Image: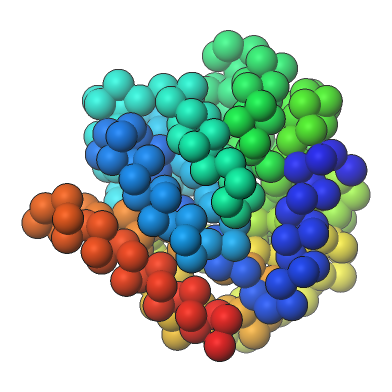
């Protein structure tokens, strides 16, 4: 087990409740402001998901796509996001979310070594299927970083079994089919998907895509080990009339979800 995977495993084990995993788009609306947003989120997070902006984010819905494009136009690059992660060292563990081309651009070994030096515990690479993940997984493991796998309701039992053989830290379970930003339904289908995933996967399961309210988070927490909130947080920033209001709204949303999960 890598050092990052061990840190994530201990975070889940020691909490004794569903973890709150809020998302920050690195560099949105610019690197300095997103660093301030990340510090706000860190006050309430159990694990922080930090996005690397990318020009063709296939898994992201319009809210996160727009935020990523703004970040790119502000000049944000992967190293800027790694610097934000370094600023958070000592707070909750950081898991970066990056598309594979951003990882490969400067060499996967160098990418993961820089991430590890910044204190990053894990990296999610949503456009690399488990069947093709071994080279990146090997580079991540050498650096001490966990490669976080994804699973979806459409994942077959065979694929879930393959994910379970290599999973470390936790598995990010996509609550809905499609891209981020929809609204999750906490229903029998989600319950059955998570039960099926648990039958093949031994590490904790975190659920994301479409979590909008504290009530959503609590309902998902009845079945999952962690709850990821992404688009709703980006939306709270995007819809604010000014920077101060954006910070207040971000604080309020994170505080509300964290309190609900810890109640």
Above or below for 21 versus 54: below
- Name the residue rendered at 25%, 26% in the picture: 74
- Name the residue rendered at 84%, 39% in the picture: 2
Image quadrant where residue 56 sits: top left
Residue 239 appears in the picture as rendered: no
Relative side of 244 to 177, left or right: left
For the view shown, which residue lies furthest in the left direction?
A: 241
In the picture, the quarter occupied by the C terminus is bottom right
Residue 179 in the image, given as x and y percentages of width and height: 45, 53
For the view shown, which residue lies furthest in the front direction?
A: 90
Relative side of 77 to 248, left or right: right
- Name the residue rendered at 77%, 26% in the picture: 143
Above or below for 120 versus 187: above
Residue 136 in the image, given as x and y percentages of width and height: 74, 27
Relative side of 244 to 199, left or right: left
In the picture, the quarter occupied by the N terminus is top right
Q: How is this picture coloured?
A: rainbow
Relative side of 149 to 65, left or right: right
Image quadrant where residue 35 sits: top left
Residue 168 in the image, given as x and y percentages of width and height: 81, 49
Given residues 215 and 44, the one toward you in this image is 44
Given residues 190 and 44, the one toward you in this image is 44
């Amino acid at each position: 087990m890598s050092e990052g995977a061990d840190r994530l495993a201990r975070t889940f084990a020691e909490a004794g409740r569903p973890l709150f995993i809020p998302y920050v788009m690195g560099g949105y609306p610019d690197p300095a402001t997103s660093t301030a947003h990340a510090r706000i989120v860190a006050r309430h997070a159990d694990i922080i998901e930090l996005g690397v902006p990318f020009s063709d984010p296939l898994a992201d819905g319009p809210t996160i796509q727009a935020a990523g494009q703004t970040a790119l136009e502000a000049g944000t690059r992967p190293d800027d996001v790694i610097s934000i992660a370094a600023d958070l060292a000592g707070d909750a563990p950081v898991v970066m979310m990056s598309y594979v081309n951003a990882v490969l651009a400067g060499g996967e070994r160098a990418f993961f070594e820089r991430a590890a030096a910044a204190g990053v515990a894990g990296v999610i690479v949503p456009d690399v299927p488990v069947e093709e993940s071994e080279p990146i997984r090997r580079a991540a493991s050498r650096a001490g970083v966990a490669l976080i796998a994804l699973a979806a309701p459409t994942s077959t039992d065979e694929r879930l079994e393959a994910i379970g053989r290599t999973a470390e830290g936790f598995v990010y379970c996509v609550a809905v089919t499609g891209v981020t930003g929809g609204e999750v339904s906490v229903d029998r289908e989600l319950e059955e998907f998570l039960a099926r995933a648990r039958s093949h996967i031994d590490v904790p399961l975190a659920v994301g895509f479409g979590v909008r309210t504290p009530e959503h988070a609590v309902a998902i927490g009845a079945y999952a080990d962690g709850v990821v909130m992404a688009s709703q947080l980006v939306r709270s920033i995007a819809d604010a009339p000014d920077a101060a209001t954006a910070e207040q709204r971000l604080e309020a949303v994170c505080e509300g979800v964290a309190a609900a999960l810890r109640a």
